[in-house]
Image (cartoon, grey):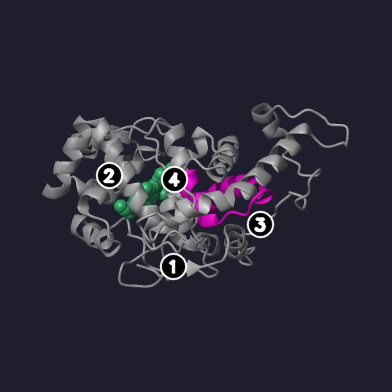
Amino acid sequence: MASTTICHSLLCSTASSTSTPTSNFQCKSKIPAKSSSTVNLGPSSSSAYHLVPSTNGGYAGDQFWCRRGLVFVATLPFLLPLYESLDDSAVKAAEPGTSEFQLIKDELRKVVSKSRAAGVLRLVFHDAGTFETNKDSGGMNGSIIYELDRPENAGLKKSLKVVEKAKSQVDAILPVSWADMIAVAGAEAVLLCGGPSIPVSLGRLDSSEPDPEGKLPQESLDASGLKQCFQRKGLSTQDLVALSGAHTLGSKGFGDPTVFDNSYFKILLDKPWRMSSAGMSSMIGLPSDRALVEDDECLRWITQYANNQNLFFEDFRKAYTKLVNFGARWRSL
Ligand code: HEM
């Protein structure tokens, strides 16, 4: 497990973890510097927070947010003992349910639509999936912002821009790491499309460099190759199958591309690509998806998830939590 970086306070640790990237992804934040009267939430926020013009030319909602930020800072000393009492030494940051978490969720909800959900969820795997247990690198660390030109990340720039819109709004109030934003964004994408609610702990630190290449599984791998690849990340065969269920979103032919359900597993069992008059069905699934159903151990999980969507949701939630926590470096209080 990667080591934990110690910082003196939540604010100092987040500030130190969110240095502006200098590589191929340009962070063009339109947010003015934080101030008590000039925080501009943009038009999309008006519906959620009922902004009304105030006498100082700003918005009443600005004061709401600034007050919210102040309340958060003011309550920090009282929250410290709570964090310190957590048993898991790897996770010593904000838990779901804090005002920080709510702020991130609120901003993400404004920008993550059903049509963007698949890309946003894929972003999580491509950031976190570089982790390997025997290496001190990779994991959910925001390094994807430096890796967008890699062939396996083609198309993810759009998804990152979606997350960036929310991040810039959050940063104007309380700096947040890319890693935390992406981890929560994927969970929000799943929920938006009808999938399980996944609590995500906060406090990941960002990397300032790209992760090593070649750590994500290739779509040409057979089941044994996929299992080994996931095992190197500390993820079991069960995790592999549950997480692959993410492919229920997107355009690979597993049901409605914007609905997160267990149709991935039902369709895998049907093997529609095998039909002689397959037509469009021959396009369904990636080679890696089709490989899973040919493996006995994977098939057992596929069958269970096809028959029991609640079980799939529960196991997806557990596996997603591992994915976004393994290898992460955490700010510590
Ligand atoms: C098991 C190994 C995996 C392989 C080989 C793999 C590979 C791929 C490939 C090649 C695509 C198609 C990209 C495109 O359309 O250009 C894709 C799509 C996708 N992947 Fe995976 N993936 C894997 C696991 C995962 C995991 C674990 C997640 C998330 C938890 C995930 C989430 C997604 C999503 C949501 C899409 C649809 C994206 C869209 O339509 O915009 N994948 N994957």
Residue 8 in sight in this render: yes
Between marks 3 and 1, how big is the CA–CA gap? 27 Å
Say which residue appears at 57% left-offset and 58% top-offset: 10
Magenta span covers which residues? 156-185
Between marks 4 and 2, how big is the CA–CA gap? 14 Å
Amino acid identity at mark 3: Cys
Mark 4, Cα crowd under 10 Å, few <14 / some 14-19 / many 20+, is: many
Q: In which quarter of the image is residue 177?
A: bottom right
Instruction: Report if the beta carbon of the residue with label 4 is closer than 8 angstroms to ligand 1.
Output: yes
Mark 2 residue element: helix
Membership of 183 in magenta stretch:
yes
Q: In the rendered image, which residue does mark 1 sit on?
A: 4
In front of the other: label 1 or label 4? 1
Q: In this view, does 248 lie to the left or right of 183?
A: left
Q: In the rendered image, which residue does mark 3 sit on?
A: 27
Closer to the chain start, of discs 1 and 4, is: 1
In front of the other: label 2 or label 1? 1
Amino acid identity at mark 4: Leu
Q: In the rendered image, which residue does mark 4 sit on?
A: 121
Mark 1, Cα crowd under 10 Å, few <14 / some 14-19 / many 20+, is: some
Say which residue appears at 63% left-offset and 50% top-offset: 73
Closer to the chain start, of discs 2 and 1, is: 1
Say which residue appears at 38% left-offset and 58% top-offset: 129
Between marks 2 and 1, how big is the CA–CA gap? 28 Å
Quadrant, the N terminus: bottom left
Amino acid identity at mark 2: Ala
Mark 4 residue element: helix
